[in-house]
Amino acid sequence: MKKEINSNDEKLVNKVFEILTKFKDDPKKFENIFTELFEKDFEVQLNDINKLESGLLKGLIISVKDLFDVRGYHTRGGTKFLETNISLSDAKCISYIRNAGGLLLGHTNMTELAYSGLGINPHYGTPDNPLYPGSVPGGSTSGGAVSVALDLSDIAIGTDTGGSTRIPAAFTGITGFKPTQDSISRDGVLTLSSTLDSVGLMAKNVKLCTLGYQAMTSKVNTKHKKLENKNLKFIIPSNFGFENIDNEIKAAFDFAKKKITESGYNVIKMNVPVLDLYKKVPIWQFASVECATEYFYLYNEKKQLIDPNVLRRIERANEVTAVEYNLLKKIRENLIEEFNKFLKNNFLLMPTVTIKPPLLEHCKNNEFYDEVNLASLRNTTLANYMNGCSISIPYFENEKPVGIMLNATTNEDDHLLKISSEIEKVLQK
């Protein structure tokens, strides 16, 4: 392939060739990361990219979660029960990636229907965690995170319903960004929860996440905030975010907090009253009811083909009345307004996840699976519920990563990304 491509972008050709060589030379190391490569389109893509005079993502390799339509390929959603036709067009945000010069590498593996924070898939296998061998990579965008961690892709496009980009980012030592929900189109993307789903992305650093976001977003930032660090508050909630935290995670978070404070940022710990109300909300009802609605006719006929851990979550929709579901939406609107009034242009500072990646073998026990899945999702789901934006930045302590999470209010994505690039430098010192 390398010899056949007549492209001026020799660097990008070499990157693609090296990736294919890695797969060929050590298939065991890279198994379960992709459900399919877009290999038959590489030459066409490279030549199209070569014709672009410029592009935000030119020269970058992009992996795509198997929830996004990509022209010429199936969208399976990590399932065996979805009988999808080959997509005739790209999801809208994926078309933006192409226009920006990004080379689409392949569909990445994921939790079935994106319904878990652990990243386990019994149908296509579970990608191994490169930093914690034998442990889960985090989910639901599991293959995407591992593709970045192993330098197979520069940016991984995923979705985030309750932490599905930030949890695997924290577990694999990379950066994960969840934007405000409607800042990136979900046209051509399979649904888990229409209320909570966002298109998100992962990369090795904030800069690449920013480039990916800018390429996909339809929002133009008309506000030009001058960052006055002295006036910004990084609020650590005293009543949320640290329940049953692992000692090692807590120690690493405290070190990270100390670095941020010593760099001149205003870090305060305080009670956040709206979070006491939030903790009482049965958030699981959104994904359960909306997923059951989205796939009702299919899953109802083919239950035997669905991961039992996913199926029992879908079937909990039977426990929810129409009144409860509609009240849940109304309560959410009120809490979003209250949360935004409280936080303003400040940030919440918390650990992304309060546990280390659990061993895949242990997750075969349903009770353990439920316990660690809930713990993984607990902190990250807040941003989805509040329709805010959130980022997980890796901080390494004793060569093991901990996710440091910043949450901001609705539509403060650019503000969050700018300050995150500064915090990233602080944590790397």
Image (cartoon, rainbow, N blue to C red):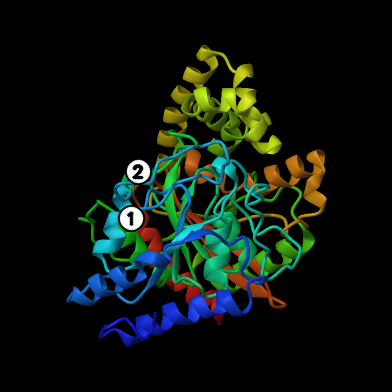
Residue 212, compared with residue 181, is above or below; it is: below
Q: Quadrant of the N terminus?
A: bottom left
Q: CA distance from mark 2 to mark 1?
A: 9 Å
Label 2, secondary structure: give it. loop
- Image position, residue 10 (x, y; %): 33, 87
Residue 289, compared with residue 9, is above or below; it is: above
Chain-order first, disc 2 or disc 1: 1
Disc 2 crowd rating (10 Å Cα; few below 14, some 14-19, many 20+) is: some
Name the foreground residue: 396 vs 66.
66
Which residue is drawn at the image coordinates 56% and 59% (left, top)? 143
* Contact (Cβ within 8 Å) of mark 2 with mark 1: yes
Quarter location, residue 314: top right
Disc 1 crowd rating (10 Å Cα; few below 14, some 14-19, many 20+) is: many
Which residue is drawn at the image coordinates 46% and 25% (left, top)? 329
Which numbered dot is residue 94? 1
Quarter location, residue 307: top right
Residue at the spot of label 2? 188
